[in-house]
């Protein structure tokens, strides 16, 4: 397989993953809706390129971490339905990563909004 074919198939597989996440993962779907709504707002709120990048990166990090969390959950579920402490830990750690990414996005957006409101 040459580089062009590899890139082509990698793109197809990535798009298949996004399609699956949007159609089957409620958390990802909700976070994607928020990202679609807030992305144009970021262009309005940002006073410079650095601020715009912080706003957008904080949004899309949430989506990236949610995809990784969903992959972890699917893998654990594939192993078996029985309760296992390691499986619980893996799922809880993935969930914690999503939670922290959402807190980060909230902090970034809250800081920018605060500066936007506080500056006359």
Image (tube, rainbow, N blue to C red):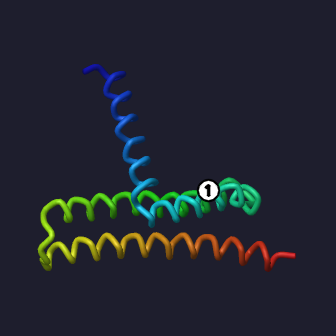
In this figure, which residue is indicated by the disc labeled 1?
A: 36
Which type of secondary structure does the marked residue at label 1 adopt? helix
Name which residue lies at 35% across and 73% down: 95
Name which residue lies at 20% across and 64% down: 77
Give the position of the N terminus as an image quadrant.
Answer: top left
Q: Compared with residue 5, is residue 59 higher up or lower down, i.e. above or below? A: below
Q: Compared with residue 66, is residue 17 higher up or lower down, i.e. above or below? A: above
Give the position of the C terminus as an image quadrant.
Answer: bottom right
Residue 11 picture location, percent across and down: 40, 35
Q: Is residue 1 left or right of residue 83?
A: right
Name which residue lies at 52% across and 64% down: 31
> Residue 65 appears in which quarter of the rendering?
bottom left
Numbered disc total: 1
Q: Is residue 107 left or right of residue 68?
A: right
Q: Compared with residue 5, is residue 21 higher up or lower down, i.e. above or below? A: below
Residue toward you, 107 or 21: 21
Residue 32 picture location, percent across and down: 53, 59
Residue 71 picture location, percent across and down: 29, 58
Residue 109 picture location, percent across and down: 63, 71
Name which residue lies at 27% across and 65% down: 73
Residue toward you, 22 or 63: 22
Taking the view exactly as shown, the residue that stands out farthest to the right is 120
Mark 1 surroundings within 10 Å by alpha-carbon count, few (fewer than 14), some (14 through 19), many (20 or more): few
> Residue 117 appears in which quarter of the rendering?
bottom right
Q: Is residue 30 left or right of residue 118?
A: left
């Amino acid at each position: 397989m040459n580089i062009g074919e590899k890139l082509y198939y990698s793109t197809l597989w990535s798009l298949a993953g996004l399609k699956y996440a949007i159609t089957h993962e409620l958390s990802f779907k909700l976070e994607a809706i928020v990202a679609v709504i807030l992305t144009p707002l970021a262009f309005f709120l940002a006073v410079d390129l650095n601020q715009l990048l912080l706003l957008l990166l904080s949004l899309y990090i949430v989506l990236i971490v949610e995809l990784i969390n969903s992959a972890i959950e699917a893998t654990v579920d594939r192993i078996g339905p029985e309760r296992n402490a390691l499986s619980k830990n893996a799922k809880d750690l993935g969930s914690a990563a999503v939670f922290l990414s959402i807190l980060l996005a909230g902090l970034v957006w809250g800081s920018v909004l605060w500066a936007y409101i506080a500056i006359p």
